[in-house]
């Protein structure tokens, strides 16, 4: 593949701070400790540190763990507003458990925000159609698995006609687990997705995994490999720019 690789750094927020996501075990996520931003789990500081790893990064993925887990969405979106203010012009993919038209319509005042709709939160394909109608700037669909179990409406996983232009393959047990991406599943989804952008979520450990993901015609969401220093500016820039 000669196409550029899309790589998006990720921060997971819980209780207003950045946490280390491991295997989708959300109840046990703890404030992050990272050499990129020693002594802090502040969202703005950690986000700036992640984005600073590679000058080619042009967007950020933000997961609101409290909202995804059903603990309630911050109506004032304090952390999101702080990030948008501190990082003007940055495109932010927001995964906050949005599952209805009303959920995404609350983002109308945030044009730089791309809603991420996770299948684990969706009740039906009808709701996804309503969301697609409401979001003029587009959205991303996260196809979520825990092990071999697809989470959400089953027909969504096999019908690409229902998919938007960006599709995420979320393998929860591989998140933060240093297990490598699920290349078999990624390849299967890419085969269905055609020209849509497909992003691997969970498992990328370093450059070898990124090259494999790129060879599959996909991009990746990454966090752990950045915090651990397994990925640096020169190598990332070379893959992203080509």
Image (spheres, rainbow, N blue to C red):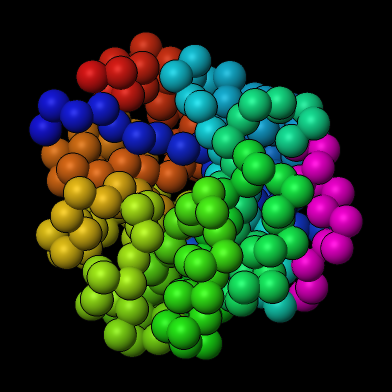
In the displayed structure, 213 sits above or below 242; it is below
Boundaries of the magenta span: 71-83
Question: Residue 15 appears at what percent x and percent y?
Answer: 82, 58
Q: Residue 136: say if magenta.
A: no
For this rendering, which residue is in front, 166 or 95?
A: 166
Left or right of 165 on screen, residue 63? right
Question: Residue 122 appears at what percent x and percent y?
Answer: 52, 80
Question: Residue 221 appears at what percent x and percent y?
Answer: 43, 45
In the displayed structure, 148 sits above or below 163; it is below
Left or right of 14 on screen, residue 6? left
**Corner quadrant of residue 115:** bottom right
**Corner quadrant of residue 150:** bottom left
Left or right of 160 on screen, residue 229? right
Residue 68 appears in the figure? no
Residue at position x 26%, y 51% in the image = 196
In the displayed structure, 206 sits above or below 101; it is above
**Corner quadrant of residue 155:** bottom left
Task: Look at the image and tell me in which quarter the C terminus lies.
Answer: top left
In the displayed structure, 153 sits above or below 144; it is below
Q: Find the residue positioned furthest to the top.
A: 234
Task: Look at the image and tell me in which quarter the N terminus lies.
Answer: top left
Residue 194 appears in the figure? yes
For this rendering, which residue is in front, 145 or 107?
A: 107
Left or right of 23 on screen, residue 50? right
Residue at position x 58%, y 25% in the image = 51
Question: Residue 206 appears at what percent x and percent y?
Answer: 34, 34
Could you tell me how many numbered marks the image carries?
0
Residue at position x 70%, y 33% in the image = 46
């Amino acid at each position: 593949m000669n196409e550029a690789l899309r790589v998006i750094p990720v921060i997971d927020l819980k209780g207003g701070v950045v946490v280390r996501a491991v295997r989708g075990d959300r109840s046990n996520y703890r404030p992050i400790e990272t050499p990129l931003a020693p002594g802090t789990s502040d969202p703005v500081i950690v986000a700036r540190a992640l984005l600073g790893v590679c000058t080619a990064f042009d967007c950020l993925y933000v997961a609101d763990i409290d909202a995804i887990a059903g603990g309630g969405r911050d109506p004032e979106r304090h952390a999101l507003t702080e990030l948008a203010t501190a990082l003007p012009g940055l495109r932010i993919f927001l995964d906050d458990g949005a599952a209805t038209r009303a959920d995404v319509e609350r983002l109308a005042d945030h044009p730089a925000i791309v809603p991420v709709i996770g299948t684990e939160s969706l009740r039906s394909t009808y709701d996804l159609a309503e969301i697609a109608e409401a979001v003029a700037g587009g959205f991303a669909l996260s196809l979520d698995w825990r092990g071999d179990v697809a989470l959400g409406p089953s027909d969504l996983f096999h019908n690409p006609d229902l998919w938007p232009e960006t599709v995420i393959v979320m393998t929860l047990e591989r998140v933060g687990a240093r297990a490598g991406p699920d290349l078999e599943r990624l390849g299967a989804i890419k085969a269905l997705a055609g020209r849509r952008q497909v992003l691997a979520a969970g498992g990328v450990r370093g450059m070898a995994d990124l090259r494999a993901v790129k060879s599959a015609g996909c991009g990746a969401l990454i966090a752990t490999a950045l915090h651990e220093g397994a990925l640096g500016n020169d190598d990332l820039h070379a893959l992203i720019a080509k």
